[in-house]
Image: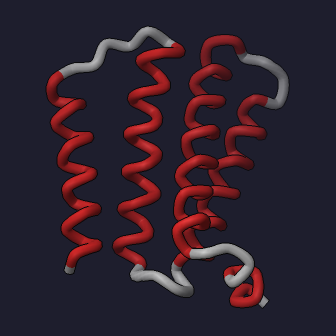
Amino acid sequence: MLLTIAKFLPTLWWTILSGMFWLSGDLLFRQYLVTKFAYGFELSFFLVVLGTFCVFMSFFQQNIAIASVAAVVFNVVGYIIASYFLFNDVLRPLQLAGIGLGITSFVLLELS
């Protein structure tokens, strides 16, 4: 049954969706920590679980390492950029270097 669900979307879309759900869950949880709005914790937890389901769906057709790294890099890069614009966080050189290393690791895994 899961294999049938996994074939509804291409592997790349499952991976991107997982990163987007993880990113949405992280951003929502950060907002929840500040405002404590109703059901914020439950909704952010649901989004993270949904992102994990999506990354599992990409494992049927893609290498686990590549799918996991792609989803995590999408999540981390998106979170750093979104927190810069939404929460006025400062981008440090170490964070920018981490973004570069994450993208490089994805490219190297894809080429191997």
- Exactly how many numbered labels are in the figure? 0
Question: Relative to residue 35, is residue 95 depicted above or below?
Answer: below
Q: How is the image coloured?
A: secondary structure
Work out which quarter of the rendered image holds the N terminus and state it. bottom right
Q: At 56% from the left edge and 36% from the top edge, which residue is drawn? A: 26
42 relative position to 54: left or right: right
Residue 61: x and y in percent read 52, 86
Position of residue 11 measured from the top left corner of the image (x, y, whole percent): 55, 74
Residue 25: give x, y in percent of width and height. Answer: 63, 40
28 left or right, relative to 38: left
- Residue 77: image quadrant is top left
Q: Residue at x 46, y 57 (%)?
A: 71
Instruction: Tell me the quarter of the picture where residue 66 sits.
Output: bottom left
Left or right position of 85 against 39: left
Look at the picture and state if 11 lies above or below 15.
below
| Up/down of 53 relative to 103, above or below | below
Which x, y percent locates residue 32?
67, 22
| Residue that protrudes farthest toward the right in the picture | 38
Q: Nearer the viewer, residue 110 or 89?
A: 110
Which quadrant of the structure image shows residue 27? top right
Q: The C terminus lies in which quarter of the figure? A: bottom left
Which residue lies at the image location 22% right of the left edge and 60% below the top edge? 105
Residue, x 54% and y 57% (percent of image)?
A: 16
Q: Is residue 91 above or below residue 77?
A: above
